[in-house]
Amino acid sequence: MQIQHYKDLIVWQKAMDLAEQIYLLSHSFPREELYGLTSQIRRAAVSVPSNIAEGHARQSTAEFKNFLSIALGSLAEVDTQQILAQRLLYIASGHAHRAEGLITEVRKMLHTLAAKLG
């Protein structure tokens, strides 16, 4: 079955859930981080579903795989930044649980999708 629209991709939907979760978590970061970690983690989180969407829209398997790779890189950024936010005590470890689960789930889905594309 051919996916007609990127919004039909479950990995895109999960990546959107992750971006939303990161926005909610970063809302309570200190004001002095507004142009630092808050901005950085939000941009990286938005980049994940954005790259999935852009890659799918290119209508070339090779380009789609390349954009999935970029999405994986952005996902690694989000993971690193949320770990740093926890270490700085901006996020309580209990509150980060959903984001961590989504990061793991999206990572697995991106690897699986890329493998299926050949």
Image (tube, rainbow, N blue to C red):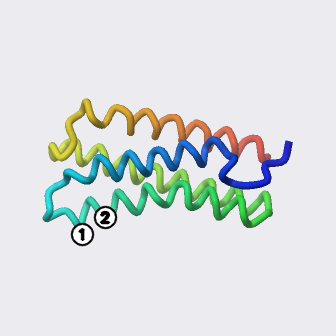
Counting from the top left corner in percent of width and height, residue 101 is at 43, 33
Q: Is mark 1 on a helix, strand or loop?
A: loop
Residue located farthest toward the bottom when viewing the structure as drawn: 35
**Left or right position of 74 against 25:** right
Asked if 98 appears above or below 29 in the picture, the reply is above
- Residue at the image point whose x is 65% and y is 64% from the top: 54
Q: What element carries label 2?
A: helix
- Residue at the image point whose x is 72% and y is 42% from the top: 115
Kind of residue sitting beneath label 1:
Tyr
Asked if 77 appears above or below 92 in the picture, the reply is below
Counting from the top left corner in percent of width and height, residue 74 is at 47, 56
Asked if 117 appears above or below 61 in the picture, the reply is above
Asked if 27 appears above or below 97 in the picture, the reply is below
Find disc 1 in the rendering and name its residue. 35
Question: Which quadrant: the N terminus?
Answer: top right
**Left or right position of 77 against 4:** left
Question: Which quadrant holds residue 96?
Answer: top left
Counting from the top left corner in percent of width and height, residue 30 is at 14, 57
Q: Which of 22 and 71 is in front in this view?
A: 22
Q: Which of 107 and 32 is in front in this view?
A: 32
Q: Which of the labelled discs sits on residue 39, or is there none? A: 2
Tag 2 near tag 1, CB within 8 Å:
yes
- Residue at the image point whose x is 46% and y is 40% from the top: 103
Kind of residue sitting beneath label 2:
Ser
